[in-house]
Image (spheres, helix red, strand yellow):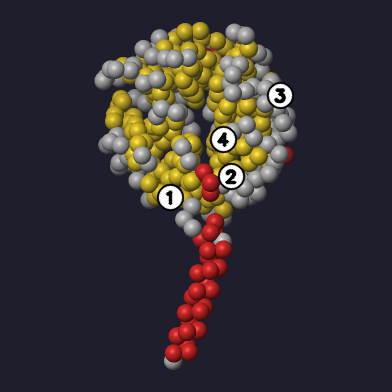
Amino acid sequence: MKNYVQVLAAIALALLSSCAENPKEEKKIVHYIEAPAIGESSLPYLFSNTEKTMMSWVEKSGDSLVKLKYADLVDGEWKEPKEIINGKDWFVNWADFPMIAENNGHLFSHVLKKSSSGTFSYDVKLNVLPKGQSRWTTNLPLHNDSTATEHGFVTALPIKSDSFFVTWLDGRNTVSNGHEHGGAMTIRAAEVSSNGEVNAESLLDDRTCDCCQTTAAITSNGPVVLYRDRLEDETRDISIVRMVNGSWTEPKAIYNDNWKIKGCPVNGPKADALDNDLAVAWFTAANNQPKVNVTFSADGGENFDVPIQINEADAMGRVDVLLLDHENAIVSWMETLEDEAQIKAVKVHTSGKKSEPITICRLDSSRKTGFPQMELVGDKVYFAWTDLSDEITTVKTAYVLLNSF
């Protein structure tokens, strides 16, 4: 009996040694943390800079009341949530979600408010909380047209010392006069002060895809905006416009996927910048081959490297990207696996070298799970997403140590 026990002990020790030799396979990589959202919640949005990390989301109360809330992340824990605004006349959509941003103590957020009884007629309404004030100023206008059309897919970033650079899709030209079809969706940009004053509104492109998310980054040269374009032949690739010497450049494709599709794929790009280095991730299904690509630019988006394909399985898109330094980025995306979906993330070098992908979570593949979010905070990469269980949505959060990639 003694010899038998000794053999079992030896086997156990060998197994433990084997685990220790493969720490990445055995150790806990994804650390789930309790999210601040309660009840039926969805549409998380992560924002982080050197001063603050925040998350906004929406909570449903009763049959029609919706609340926009946010919370700060401090020492790895979400603090007590705060409410920004609530309403019963919002447009709440899985792909077009509210967001929040911060600039030197000034806070900015937005919601989409219906402008008529039509399903797809809504306006962007701004909410601001200047530094030192305790009450949000809400329902401020972003755009000055009065058309009952679509306005949304907002991106907002801090710029200068107390302002926000904002870009959005604007449907004011899509109005039909009863005899002719309306025009195309446009993309516009403006600068919004800490008290909500809108300045320097510009038309960036007069024909874009209708419902793909916009993205932007602040390079050393100035802001750049990326979005899914729409040519006359229905080619819908990713284009960029750049602010150069005070003026916007003409739209230019970052790469010619040549994806021709007659409907909007509801899958926008994401970008991140460090000085004049820029990383852009996006989804394409050109030639019926679903792909998530990433490309790098070393000159503020004037030129781009050859794209690097990220996914190996059936990609759904819903991407995000973090530029870690001048040569490395982390890309997150969703892909299908049998009857479910996965959120995955991988580190990629400008040379094309990739780390082993990390599966953040498995979740339902329906639209209700929305667009996962990702932000770098110190030595951790934080994730937020919408979980769906028994038709109830709940915001979830987790982090992965940066050195795990």
The image shows residue 334 at horizontal and vertical percentages of: 55, 44
Reading the chain from its start, which is encountered first: label 3 or label 2? 3
Type of amino acid at the residue the image marks with label 2: Val
What is the CA distance from the residue labelled 4 to the residue labelled 1? 20 Å
The image shows residue 247 at horizontal and vertical percentages of: 61, 9
Which residue shows up at 67% across the image and 14% down it?
250
What is the CA distance from the residue labelled 3 to the residue labelled 2? 24 Å
Reading the chain from its start, which is encountered first: label 4 or label 2? 4
Residue of label 3 = 303
Q: Are marks 3 and 1 in contact (CB under 8 Å)?
A: no
What is the CA distance from the residue labelled 4 to the residue labelled 2? 12 Å
Secondary element under disc 4, as helix, strand or loop, is loop
126 or 329: nearer the eye? 329
Which residue shows up at 30% across the image and 42% down it?
39
Where 97 falls versus 358 (above or below)?
Answer: above
What is the CA distance from the residue labelled 1 to the residue labelled 2? 16 Å
Q: Residues within 10 Å of mark 1 (few under 14, many from 20)?
A: few
What is the CA distance from the residue labelled 3 to the residue labelled 1? 38 Å
Reading the chain from its start, which is encountered first: label 3 or label 4? 3
Q: Quadrant of residue 135?
A: top left
Which residue shows up at 72% across the image and 31% down it?
305
Type of amino acid at the residue the image marks with label 4: Leu
Q: Residues within 10 Å of mark 3 (few under 14, many from 20)?
A: few
Residue of label 1 = 31
What is the CA distance from the residue labelled 3 to the residue labelled 4? 20 Å
Evaluate whether residue 112 shows in this view. Answer: no
